[in-house]
Amino acid sequence: MATWRRLAGRHLNIAMGLALVLLIAGLSASAPLLSRPDPTAADMPNQLHRPSRLFPLGTDHLGRDLLSRVLYGGRVTLAVGLAVVCVTTAAGGAVGLAAGMSPALDRWVMRVMDALLALPAILLAIAAVTILGRSVLNVVVALAVSSMPRMARLVRGSALVLREGPIVESARAIGAGTPRILVRHVLPNVVSPIVVQGTYTFSTAVLTEASLSFLGVGPAHGVPSWGSVLSEGRDLIDRAPWMTIFPGIAIVLTVLGINLLGDGLRDALDPQLRI
Amino acid sequence: MIRYVIVRLLVAIPVVLIVASLVFVLGRVMPGDPVAVMLGDQGTPEDIARLRQTLGLDDPLPTQYLRWLRQALLQLDLGDSIYLKRPVVQALAERIAPTFMLTALGAGLAIAGGVSLGVTSAVHRNTWVDRVVMVLALLGLSIPSFWLGLALILIFAVWLHVLPSSGYDGVRYLLLPAVAIGLSGMGIIARMARSSLLDVLRQPYVQTARGKGLTNRTVIWRHAMRNALVPTLTVVGLIVTSLAGGAIVVESVFAIPGAGRLIIQSVARRDYPVIQGGVMFVALLYVLANLIVDVLYAYIDPRVRYA
Amino acid sequence: MVRHCGHISLLALVCVLALALGVAGAPPAPSDAARFGGVLRVATNAEPPGFDLQLHTAQIAFTIGQHVFETLFTLNARKQFVPFLLESYTVDADSKMFTFKTRTGVRFHSGGEMTSADVLASLQRWQRVSGRGRALLASLTGASAPDATTVTLVFSQPNGALISALAIPTQGMVVLPRDVIDRNRGADGRDRELKGADLIGTGPYRLAEWLPDRYVRLTRFREYARRSDPPSGMAGARFGYADEIRFIPVPDNLTRLAGLISGEYDLANPLVPDMYDRVQRTQPLVGQVVGPGGGVVAVFNKRRGPFVDVRMRQAAWYATDPKQVMKAVSENEVFYRLTPALAGKEWGVWNFPNVGSDVYGRGRDADRAQTLMREAGYHGEPIRWITTRDFAYMDRSSQIGAEQMKRAGLNVELVVSDWATVIADRGRPERYEIFSTGISFLGDPTATAAFTPTWPGWYESSRNNSNYQALVQETKPDRRRELAREQQRIFWDEIPYMQWGELLQFRAHRRVVQDVPADNLYVLWNTWLEKR
C-alpha cells in the first residue's frame, strides 16, 4: 500500500501533465474532425454571443465560433512550440556536446551562450521580427536562439561529467573514436536532462509566442494563434470577456500541463534533481 | 575577494563584446534602407545618398563595426532616435526609472512571496499545504503576464475603482503591474526555495542542531535559511531577465512610460536605433546585474571565491 | 500631402453640429458660470511626432497644436470659412489676386507682434515644406507684403480652393514668426523641422513642456489677442479658461477608459465604440458620439494589377456588403451611418445622400460581381490586401471584406502588418492590390488627397482629373456645389476606393468638465472645470 502511495505520488505529476497536454493537443489536432464552424468565416448575425450550447465558448465580433478559433489556434501555437523545442535541442545539444567534449571550444562557446542569456527572449524576438520580418520561421529561430543557452549549458554539464567518468575512459581504452563515444556512450546518458529541459523550453516558447502575438509582432498568417485571438478581444474585454478569458485559459492549461509533465519526468528520471 | 571581482569583470567583457556584435549584425542585416525610412516620402535619391555618406553607411563593414563598438561601448553613444530626434541613450535614460522601479518591485514581490511560500511548503512537506502551494506556484508561472495584467486592470481599476490602471505618478501606480510580472517569478522562487531548504534540512549539521534540542523554528531560521537562500540567489539573476521581459509587455498594457514601452513603440515606428540601442542597453544591464549577484554570492559563500 | 489617415484621422477637421448625447443642437457658448483656472488632463491615444504643423500630417500633432498655432482662416459653426488672423480680405473678379489685411495687436508667444512679413514668410515656408502647400500654391506668380498689414497673392490661374485650404489644419498654414523661420533655414535654403523653443505661435496656449511618452503641457498665454466676436465653432473668441492643458498618451484603449473612470484623466479622446455601454453605465462620465465621421475605406491599386480595370473594382464592391462590414466594425449601430455620401450630413451643402445610392444601396450582389469579373477576364490572379491590427476598424473591415470577396471568387490574401509598414508599402505599386485606411472629408472637395493622381492608389482618371481641376479654379459657390456633386457621381461610377460607411467617433469626459465641444476638432480653449 505504502509503495503504491509513493509510486502514485511520484508519477502523479507525469500522469496529470500528460493528461492535460494530450487532451489539448488531441483536441487541437482533431479540430477539423469536430464539425464546428469555420474559425475564419465571419457570421455576422451571430456577433458577440455569450457562451451557449451552440457556441460553448461564445463568438467574437465577427460572429466566429471561439471554440473553433481556440482549437485551431492551438495547432499553430503548439506547432511553433514544438518547432522551437526541436531547433533548440538540436542546436543547443550540438553546441553543448561540442563544448563538453572539447576544452578548447568550451570557453568561447560558453561566452557566446552567456551573451545570449543576457537578452530577454521577448526582446530578442521583437528585434528579430521587426528587422527580419514577421514570419513563423523568424519567430521560431528567435525563440530557439533565446532558449539555446540553457540547453547547451545542460548538455555541456552532462558531457563534462561523463568525459571524466569511467564509461568514456574505458571506451577510449579500447580504442573507440570520439564520434562513436559521443553516440554510443554520452548521448544516451544526456537524454533525460534534455527531455526535462525540453518541456520547459516548450512552455516558455508557448508563453513568449503568445506575448508576441498579443503585442502584434507575432507571425502574420491566416489562422491566428492563441495570442492573437486574445489580442482581438482586448478592446472588447468589457463587452465580451469570453474573448480573452478562454484563449488565456487554454494557454495556462497547456503551459501548466507541460510543466507538470516536466516536473514528473525529472522526478522519475533523475531522483537527485527532485524538488 | 578583490581578485574574484576583477576576474568576474574580465569575464564579462567578452560577453559584452559578443552582445554588441550580435546587435550590430542584427542592425546591418535589416531589409530596406534606414535612410530612406528616415527621410520618408520627401527624400530624393540625392538626399538619400548624401545622408548615407554623412552617417557613414557607405564605409566598409569592418570600419562600421569598429566604429559601432567604439561608439557604443567606449563613448556610450547608441545613436539618435529617428522619431524622437534625440540621443538614444537620453531617451532610454529618461525612461529607465519606471522600468527599474517596476522590475525591482516585481522582483521584491517575487522574492518575498516566493520565499515565504517555499519555506511554508518545505516545513509542511508532503502535507496538503505543500501540494496546494506547489500547484499554486506552478500555476503562477504558467499564466501569461499580459493576460494577468488585463484581468487586474479590469477587476481592480474598471470594476472596483480601487487602484489606478495607468500612468506613473508614484509607486501605487506600479502595484498592479508589479503583481502581473512578479507572479511567475514568485512561482519559480517558491519552488527553488522549497527544494534548497529541503536539501539543507537533510544535512548532518541540521540533525545535530536538532539533536542539541533546538526548536524546529530556531533550526530553520538560524541555520538552514541562510544556506538555503544561496542557491535562490543564483535564480534571482535569471529572474531579472525574465522580469525585464515581462516588464516590456506589461508596460504597454498599463501605459507606463518605461524603457520597455519605448522599445515596443519604436518597433511600430521603425525607429531602428532605439530598438538596437534598447537591446544593447538591456543586455548590459543584465550583465551588470549578474555581476552584482555573483559578487554577493561570493560574499555570502566564501567557497565560491576560489572556484 | 499624404495624410496619415488612421483611427484618429476619422475626425473631420472643422466644426459641426453636435451629436453629443444629451447635448442640444446649438454649439455651446461659454456660460456665465465659466471660470478660469484648473488643469485639464486629456488622455489621447498617440504620441505626437512633433509640433511643426506645417510639416506633420499626424492628427495628434494638430489636435494638440491647434491650441498653440493659428491659421489665417478657420471654420465657424455654420461651416463657413471666416477670417481669423485676418481682419478682412478681398478677391479680384478673376479670383487670381488675393489681398489679405492682417489683424493688429496679435502677439507671438515670444513677445513680438504679428505683421504681414510674418504671414508672408509663413506662406512661403508652407509652400516649401508642405505637400498641400506646394499643390495649392503651384500657380502662384507673385507674393508680397506692401505694408505692415497687407499681403498680396497673385496667381496665374483662378484659385477657388485657397480660402478653404488656408483654414484646414492638416499640414496647415499656421502663422510663425519670421525670425524663427529664417534661423531654421540651412545655407542651402532647406528648412529644418521646428523644435523646442522655436515652437512659437499666436494661440491662447503656449507649449510649456513636452516629455515624450509622458505628456505635453500647454499653459495659458497671458498676452493672447482674443477676438471680440462670440465663439462659433473654431472661430471667434478663444478664452483659454484652463490654466493648463495636459495631453497624456495612453495607447491601450482599456487603460485609457479605466484612467478616466478612476479620475486620473478628465477627458479621454478617442475611446473605442466597444466601450459605449460601460461609459453609459458609469455615472460620473459623459459620453459623446461625434459626427461627421470618417469613411471606412479600402483603396485599390489603380496603377497596376487587376484593379486597373474599373469592372474589377466594381466586382469587388458588389462582392461586399456595407451593412455587414460596418456591423463588424462596430456592433453598436449608433456609431456609423450607411450612406454613399463622401461628406457627412453635418457638412450641409457638401452632403449628397442620394448620389450613388444606385451603387451603394445594392448591398451584396454576387451575380453582378461574377459577371463583371468574367467580363474583365479575371482568372484568379492573387490580390494582396495590406492592412493592420493597429486600428480596429481597419482590422475588422478588412477581415470581413476579404472574406466576402473570397466567397465571390476573388483570390484575396490579407497581409497584416503594423501601420508604419502599411504607410510605407502603400507608396509602392508592386507591393499590393488593396490597402486599408480611413478617409475623411476635410471641408472642401479639393482637399481630399485620394482624388489626386499622386496619392497612393493613383487615381488617374481623366474624368476625375478634369472635374478636380475645375473645382480648383471655380470660385462661385453654386457652381462648386454642382462640381462636388459630380465628383461623387464619378466616384460611384469609377469606385477608386471602397467606402462602406461613415464611422463616428466616441469620446468621454467627467461631469466636472464643462463646455466640451461636440465637434470633431476637439478644441479645448473654451472648456472649463467646475470647482471640485
Image: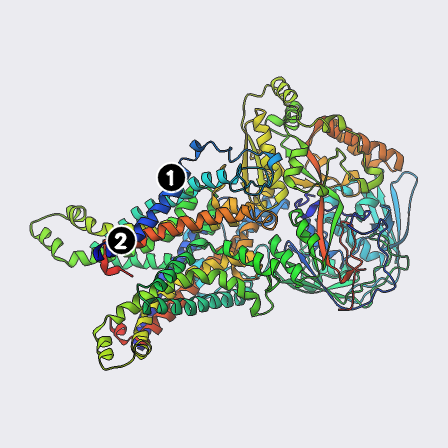
Q: Nearer the viewer, mark 1 or mark 2?
A: 2
State the SS at label 2: helix
> In this figure, which colouring scheme has been used for the structure?
rainbow
Tag shown at residue A26? 1
Residue at 68% x, 33% y: name it. C323
Question: Disc 2: which chain?
Answer: A
Tag shown at residue A212? none
State the SS at label 1: helix
Mark 1 residue crowding within 10 angstroms, few (<14) / some (14–19) / many (20+): some
**Does residue C185 appear to the left or right of A50 in the view shown?**
right
**Which residue is labeled 2 in the image?**
A8
Residue at 66% x, 45% y: name it. C4
Give coordinates of residue C361: x percent, y percent: 73, 28
Q: Amino acid at mark 1?
A: Gly
**Does residue B201 appear to the left or right of B35 in the view shown?**
left
Which residue of the protein is positioned furthest toward the front in this rendering?
Answer: A1
Question: Disc 1: which chain?
Answer: A
Closer to the camera, A78 or C304? A78
Q: Is residue A249 above or below residue C348?
A: below
Q: Is residue B112 above or below residue C424?
A: below
Which picture quadrant has residue A154? Answer: bottom left
Closer to the camera, A56 or B91? A56
Closer to the camera, C61 or A247? A247
Asked whether residue A104 is in view, the answer is: no
Dots 1 and 2: beta carbons under 8 Å?
A: no
Asked whether residue C436 is in view, the answer is: yes
Instruction: Answer with mark 1 or mark 2, whichever residue precedes in sequence.
Output: 2
Residue at 37% x, 56% y: name it. A116
